[in-house]
Image (spheres, rainbow, N blue to C red):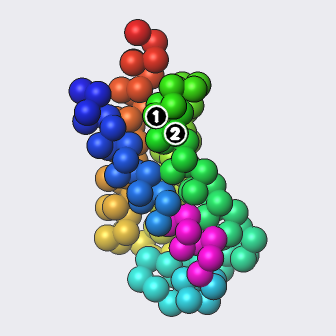
Amino acid sequence: MNTALWITAGLLALVALVGGITKAFVPKERLAAAPGGEWTGTASTGFVKSLGVLEILAAIGLILPALTDIAPVLVPITATCWILLMIGALITHYRNEGVSKVMLLNVVYLALAAFVALGRFDIVAA
């Protein structure tokens, strides 16, 4: 179970890191032109960059606390925050595009985060 949690958290951290770096450093106009990034056209630059920074922090929070064994409870808390972020992403994509393939990815990320949150809360409580 622990191995599955590490793999899942690692995959989520990679997704968060790539998404965060993209949102934080790629110009908003270029993001808006990319598939799935249309929503950034109506969002402020500051909002998009802030989301990018939050995603980078999520990548760190999904791995570093468990790796260093310093405040490992931060991993399931971060995964829970990722669930909330994915709910927001689902709402945003639905409002801008209707039901889309990007939403399916958001649901998958949400499910993976739920697995990490539940699994890590269980390990921390034990």
The residues colored magenta run 19-26
Q: Classify residue 117 by image quadrant.
A: top left
Q: Which residue is mark 2?
A: 64
Q: Amino acid at mark 2?
A: Leu
Q: Is residue 85 depicted above or below 31 in this figure?
A: above
Q: Is residue 69 left or right of residue 99?
A: right
Q: Is residue 79 visible?
A: no
Q: Residue at x 49, y 60 (%)?
A: 17
* Along the viewing direction, whichever of 115 and 74 lies nearer the viewer: 74
User: Which labelled disc corresponds to residue 67?
Assistant: 1
Residue 86: percent from left, percent from top: 48, 53
Q: Is residue 51 visible?
A: yes
Residue 77: percent from left, percent from top: 55, 32
| Cα distance in 3D space between marks 1 and 2 | 5 Å
User: Contact (CB < 8 A) between labels 1 and 2?
Assistant: yes
Task: State yes or no: residue 113 in magenta.
Answer: no
Q: Residue at x 38, y 64 (%)?
A: 103
For numbered disc 1, what is the local secondary structure? helix
* Along the viewing direction, whichever of 84 and 74 lies nearer the viewer: 74
Q: Classify residue 73 by image quadrant.
A: top right
Q: Is residue 2 depicted above or below 94 in this figure?
A: above
Residue 122: percent from left, percent from top: 39, 18
